[in-house]
Amino acid sequence: MKKLRASYQASGGVYGSPRVHRDLREDGERCGEHRVARLMRIHGIRAIRGYKKPRYRAGRPSVVVPNRLE
């Protein structure tokens, strides 16, 4: 768990379980990706999401036109 937290904090909280698993394997630790994911889920460690640029959502009318065909 100490190595898992160290890898997660070294990434600035951006890494999820696949990348943390890869870091642990590079350090010589023997573990599976599902085990890393389970441990992260149990201890409440989650990757930071939402660092992409927000996009405009098309299809929203800006002005409602009055109904003239009644």
Image (cartoon, helix red, strand yellow):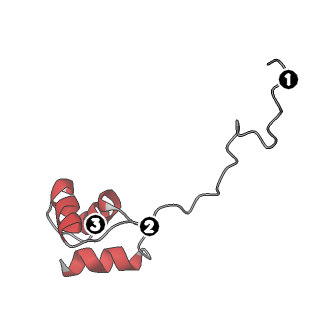
Image quarter where the N terminus lies is bottom left
**Is 43 left or right of 10, judged from the image as shown?**
left
Q: Amino acid at mark 3?
A: Glu
Residue 62 versus residue 39 in the image, above or below: above
The residue lying toward the viewer, choosing from 43 and 56, is 56
The answer to whether the residue labelled 1 contacts the one labelled 2, judged by CB atoms less than 8 Å apart, is no
Closer to the camera: disc 1 or disc 2?
1
**Is 17 left or right of 15, judged from the image as shown?**
left
Callout 2 secondary element? loop
Closer to the camera: disc 3 or disc 1?
1
Residue name at image x 17 percent, y 68 percent:
42
Closer to the camera: disc 2 or disc 3?
2
Q: Amino acid at mark 1?
A: Arg
First-in-chain label (3 vs 1): 3
The residues tagged by marks 2 and 3 sit, at their Cα atoms, a distance apart of: 22 Å
Callout 3 secondary element? helix
Q: Which residue is mark 3?
A: 26
First-in-chain label (2 vs 3): 3
Mark 3, Cα crowd under 10 Å, few <14 / some 14-19 / many 20+, is few
- Specify the label residue 68 is tagged with: 1
Mark 2, Cα crowd under 10 Å, few <14 / some 14-19 / many 20+, is few
Residue name at image x 14 percent, y 62 percent:
31
Which corner quadrant of the image does residue 9 belong to? bottom left
**Is 65 left or right of 57, judged from the image as shown?**
right
Residue 44 location (% of width, % of height): 25, 71
- Specify the label residue 48 is tagged with: 2
The answer to whether the residue labelled 3 contacts the one labelled 1, judged by CB atoms less than 8 Å apart, is no
The single residue placed furthest to the front in the displayed view is 70
Residue 13 location (% of width, % of height): 41, 73
Which corner quadrant of the image does residue 7 belong to? bottom left
